[in-house]
Each structure stands twice: as structure tokens, then as C-alpha cells.
Image (spheres, rainbow, N blue to C red):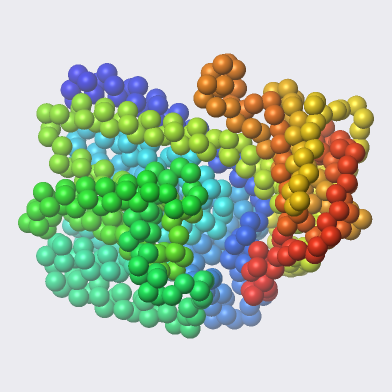
């Protein structure tokens, strides 16, 4: 170990520990035992149907039953594991299980980085590129954590095992590949990867075996499969848009705005692919045939690329947060490939420069996503309270599932303390809003006021009618960097605001108030709004995907 790495290792080690601890703390703090979108039909409906099934064949059917365009057998097996261990379907447990997938991917790439560089500093970029706040949207959504992160972790494990030289590991890798096939809609791509990796290693027999196993696995995947119609875009249009979408997904790490179709992730995706191919060319086919590490990196990158192609055909978008893990996979594979090309004499200096760049990226993600993280629980709690108290008919879908779980003797994912605090809170005159402003427009309503930092950590805007309530989170306005420095490190300004579109609210007359759960109080705004048109319900049946009602 050189003098540079001796002195810098401890500093970087402490930084990495802080980054991992920060992300882990927020996962633990923000993970809620409250269902969200696909959690209802992908996980809750499954456990209900599984326990009601009378035969073993029926139970197996529900494990591998199609969910949208996916088969998510792996996620459902984790649900069963949670049920048999704890006797419940606790979404916090499932989120923690899903988070392990990110740790697994990081460990595999850390091992390969260390072996390739013979330098412990090489693991620092792997950790910084994996454990950042950009993945929080997937980590805190149980279905996404188990499915989207799970399929990447399983694929990496399968590829890593199948490229080992001993006799046992490839066999275990094949088992992992079979599980990967039924982890998500992109899972079957693992067999194409296996065939390419076998051919890259010059092993034709292995390639033929993988082809045969892949045909059998994909046949089982497609058995009774129904291709869902996600949108009306023609195949020709999808093929034309495919290059942009694939590049955007692979470069998605650098899309911090996540709206529209920005050029930066597309350019980043092009650069990532170009660098990987350039390093691959410099390595040479003969060296790749003898190097399991290079074969693993080719397989990992190819799985990310094939996943991006599948998404471009199925979804036609690259701005969704849950696709970021594919970008992370390709970025980690590219970094490890670059690492193998770095001259040994410049290794320490190069790694320290790369570490500084990756730390800067981590801090950028922290600045961008940290405010959203602080609001995450408020947003989810507001949705939960609206589901329980709204007059909309989608409310019955929630209760139907919760009651079914209770009938089966399962502790359901339902936090009664949130609802009990809401219904027990009283109006008060002892607390007032500072400088409140009400803004009314043709189809929007907004309330703003000023707040002393830390006075109301959690607040909601509530619209009450005779038939129910709609609850919306109050946003905190984030300071600009200059204001952040001038305020002595306050991330948020004193201004609080809540915007409501009338398109979200059923027809009726509503009184306005601010709900403060920590004070168990409501503050009346002394205002009413009247919605005259009966719009499409905010909590529609499609939100619960009630085609799959148990």
C-alpha cells in the first residue's frame, strides 16, 4: 500500500461509513407500514389469495401469477417468508428486505473492484454510486424494492456465480437465474446474458446448455401470459424512440430533475456505453476469454442494456425514479471496466480523483433529494388519511383488503395511530398561523403562511365536507444555496404552502383547516370552497388496480 492510500484510506473510510449510515437511517425512519399503489394488488392481494387457496397447485399459481407485464415470484416469496416468520404482512419488513438487494449489488462490485485494482480505495466509488438518496423512491416502496432492486441483485449474483471457475458456483448461478426470470418483466433477459457470457468465454457447450435452460425458463414465464396494452403508441414509434429511451435509462443517474425528456441523461448514457465499449476493445477478446471478472462486467452491463430495451418497448419513458438502479448497474460495470485499464503507478492518484468526483455527485443527490425525503412521510400519511376519510368509492377497496387480512388472522399493514390522532384532534384558538395568505384561481386553491423554524414539523391542509375529508401535505419552501448559507444552515425558508387543484376533489362544499398532528389540533382558515363539477376521483379504482380484487 502506497503512502497516499495509507493516509487517505481512513478519511475515505469514515466518509463512506457516514454515507451508508445516513441512507440507512432515513430508510429506517421513513419506512411506513402503509400500502402504496402496487403494494395492494401485487403483495396484499397475493397473500390473501395464497392463504385462501385450497391446493398446493393453486398456491403455486398465485406465487407466479402475472402482475401487469411482470411475474414477481421472488417478491411474493419474500412476502411469504415475512408471513411465516412474523405472522403478518409488515411493509416495513419488506422494505428492509428490499434494501438488502442494494447491499448485495454493492458488495459484489466492491469485491471485483478490489480484486481488479489491488487497492482498497477502489471500493469507495462503488459505495458512493450505490448508497445515495436518488434510490430512496424505490427503497421506500415495498413492491419496487423487492421487484426493481431485487431483479438487479439476483441478476448480478447469477452472473457473478456463473462466471466463477469452480464447479459448484455456476450451478448455483443457474438457480439464481431461474429466480431472476420470475423476479420482474426484465428477468428473462438473464438467459441472453448467460449465452453471451458463455460465448465470450469461448465455451460453446456452456452456451448451448444455457440456451436450453433459457428456452425452458422463458417458456414457463410465457405460459398463460397476457401481453398488457400499456399505451396506444405504435410499435414503429416505439422502435424510433428506443435509442433515446435506452440512453436515457442508462444515463438516468445524471437526471436529477426527473421531468420532461432532458438531454443530459441521454448524453450521459451515450458516454457510459462509449467508455464501456472502448475499454472492452482495449481489453481484447483473448484476455476476456481468460478473465472471469471481465465476463462478469460484460454480463452485468448487458443485463442493464437489455432491461433498458425492454422498458423502452413496454413503458416508453426514462424519467421514472425506479429505473435509476439500471443506470447504477451500468455505471458500476463501466467504473470497474475503467479500473482494469488504469496504470498501476497512477492508481492511487486516479482513485482519489474519482473518489472526490463521486463524493461530489453523492452530495448533489443529497441536496436534491433530501427535502423530498423530509416530506416523504407527510405525503404518504396524507394519502393514507384521504383513503380512510374520503367519500370516494375507492375507499372500499382499501377496507376490503384490510378486512380480508383480518379475517385470515393476519396483522394487516394499517397504522391506526395515524387515523386515531386525526379523528381525535380538535379545533383550537390557542395556535394561529403567521401572515396567512389565501390565493384562489379558477381551478386552484393555495394557502401560504410563515412559520418559525421547527415550530410545526408536520402539518397538513384539510378539506372537510359533510361526507368526508381530503388531506394534503403542506410543503416547505427550500432555500436557495445563498439563502442556505446566509440563514446559518437552514435548509428551508420560513414559508409554508399548500396548493390544491379542484381536479383532485369530488363535488361538494368544503371548509378549510390546517391539521397539526403533533399538537392534535386543527386551525380553521375561516374559508370555504365549492367544487361544482364531479371530476374523476383522485383515488380511482385504477389506483388500486381492482382487476385483481381477491
Q: Residue furthest bottom?
A: 224
Place of residue 475 in the rendered image (x, y in percent of width and height, measured from the top left): 67, 38
Place of residue 25 in the rendered image (x, y in percent of width and height, measured from the top left): 55, 35
> Image point 61% across, 49% down: which residue?
92
Compared across the picture, whether 7 is left or right of 240 comes to: left
Place of residue 469 in the rendered image (x, y in percent of width and height, measured from the top left): 83, 52
Q: Nearer the viewer, residue 479 or 15?
A: 479
Place of residue 279 in the rendered image (x, y in percent of width and height, measured from the top left): 16, 48
Dividing the image into 4 quarters, which one contains the C terminus? bottom right
Q: Is residue 459 above or below residue 63?
A: above
Q: Is residue 6 above or below residue 93?
A: above
> Image point 71% across, 61% down: which residue?
539
Asked if one can make out residue 390 in the rendered structure from this viewpoint, the answer is yes
Compared across the picture, whether 550 is left or right of 72 comes to: right
Q: Residue furthest front?
A: 442
Asked if one can make out residue 154 in the rendered structure from this viewpoint, the answer is no
Dividing the image into 4 quarters, which one contains the N terminus? top left
> Image point 71% across, 44% down: which residue?
499
Q: Is residue 534 above or below residue 9?
A: below
The image quarter containing residue 170 is bottom left
User: Count of labels shown?
Assistant: 0
Q: Nearer the viewer, residue 330 or 32?
A: 330
> Image point 45% across, 60% down: which residue?
317
Q: Residue furthest left?
A: 286
Compared across the picture, whether 202 is left or right of 106 comes to: left
Amino acid at each position: 500500500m502506497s503512502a497516499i492510500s495509507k493516509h487517505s484510506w481512513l478519511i475515505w473510510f469514515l466518509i463512506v461509513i457516514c454515507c451508508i449510515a445516513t441512507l440507512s437511517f432515513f430508510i429506517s425512519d421513513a419506512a411506513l407500514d402503509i400500502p402504496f399503489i402496487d403494494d395492494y394488488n401485487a403483495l396484499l392481494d397475493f397473500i390473501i389469495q395464497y392463504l385462501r387457496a385450497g391446493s398446493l397447485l393453486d398456491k403455486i399459481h398465485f406465487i407466479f401469477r402475472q402482475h401487469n407485464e411482470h411475474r414477481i415470484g421472488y417478491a411474493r416469496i419474500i412476502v411469504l417468508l415475512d408471513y411465516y416468520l412474523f405472522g403478518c404482512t409488515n411493509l416495513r419488513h419488506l422494505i428492509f428486505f428490499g434494501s438488502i438487494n442494494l447491499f448485495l449489488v454493492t458488495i459484489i462490485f466492491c469485491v471485483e473492484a478490489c480484486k481488479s485494482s489491488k487497492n482498497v480505495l477502489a471500493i469507495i466509488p462503488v459505495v458512493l454510486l450505490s448508497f445515495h438518496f436518488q434510490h430512496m423512491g424505490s427503497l421506500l416502496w415495498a413492491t419496487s424494492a423487492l421487484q426493481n432492486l431485487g431483479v438487479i441483485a439476483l441478476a448480478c449474483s447469477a452472473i457473478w456465480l456463473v462466471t466463477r471457475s469452480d464447479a459448484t458456483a455456476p450451478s448455483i448461478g443457474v438457480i439464481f437465474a431461474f429466480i431472476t426470470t420470475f423476479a420482474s418483466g426484465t428477468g428473462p433477459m438473464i438467459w441472453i446474458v448467460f449465452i453471451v457470457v458463455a460465448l465470450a468465454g469461448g465455451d460453446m457447450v456452456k452456451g448451448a446448455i444455457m440456451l436450453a435452460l433459457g428456452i425452458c425458463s422463458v417458456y414457463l414465464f410465457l405460459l398463460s401470459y397476457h401481453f398488457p396494452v400499456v399505451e396506444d403508441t405504435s410499435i414503429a414509434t416505439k422502435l424510433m424512440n428506443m435509442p433515446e429511451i435506452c440512453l436515457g435509462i442508462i444515463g438516468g443517474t445524471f437526471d436529477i430533475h426527473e421531468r420532461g425528456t432532458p438531454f443530459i441523461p441521454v448524453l450521459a448514457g451515450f458516454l457510459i456505453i462509449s467508455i464501456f465499449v472502448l475499454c472492452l476493445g482495449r481489453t481484447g477478446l483473448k484476455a476476456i476469454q481468460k478473465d472471469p471478472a471481465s465476463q462478469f462486467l460484460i454480463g452485468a452491463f448487458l443485463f442493464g442494456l437489455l432491461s433498458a430495451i425492454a422498458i423502452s418497448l413496454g413503458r416508453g419513458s426514462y424519467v421514472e425514479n425506479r429505473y435509476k438502479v439500471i443506470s447504477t448497474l451500468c455505471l458500476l460495470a463501466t467504473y470497474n471496466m475503467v479500473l482494469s485499464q488504469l496504470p498501476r503507478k497512477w492508481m492511487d492518484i486516479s482513485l482519489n480523483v474519482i473518489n472526490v468526483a463521486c463524493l461530489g455527485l453523492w452530495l448533489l443527490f443529497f441536496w436534491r433529494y433530501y427535502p423530498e425525503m423530509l416530506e416523504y412521510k407527510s405525503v404518504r400519511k396524507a394519502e393514507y388519511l384521504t383513503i380512510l376519510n374520503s367519500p370516494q368509492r375507492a375507499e372500499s377497496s382499501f377496507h376490503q383488503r384490510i378486512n380480508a387480512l383480518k379475517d385470515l388472522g393476519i396483522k394487516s399493514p394499517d397504522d391506526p395511530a395515524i387515523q386515531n390522532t386525526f379523528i381525535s384532534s380538535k379545533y383550537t384558538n390557542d395556535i394561529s398561523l403567521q401572515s396567512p395568505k389565501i390565493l384562489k384561481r379558477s381551478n386552484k386553491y393555495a394557502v401560504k403562511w410563515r412559520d418559525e423554524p421547527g415550530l410545526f414539523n408536520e402539518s397538513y391542509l384539510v378539506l372537510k365536507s359533510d361526507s368526508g375529508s381530503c388531506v394534503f401535505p403542506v410543503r416547505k419552501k427550500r432555500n436557495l444555496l445563498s439563502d442556505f448559507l446566509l440563514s446559518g444552515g437552514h435548509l428551508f425558508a420560513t414559508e409554508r404552502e399548500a396548493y390544491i387543484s379542484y381536479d383532485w376533489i369530488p363535488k361538494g362544499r368544503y371548509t378549510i383547516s390546517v391539521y397539526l398532528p403533533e399538537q392534535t389540533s386543527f386551525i380553521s382558515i375561516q374559508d370555504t370552497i365549492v367544487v361544482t363539477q364531479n371530476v374523476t376521483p383522485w383515488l380511482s379504482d385504477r389506483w388500486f388496480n381492482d382487476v385483481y380484487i381477491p
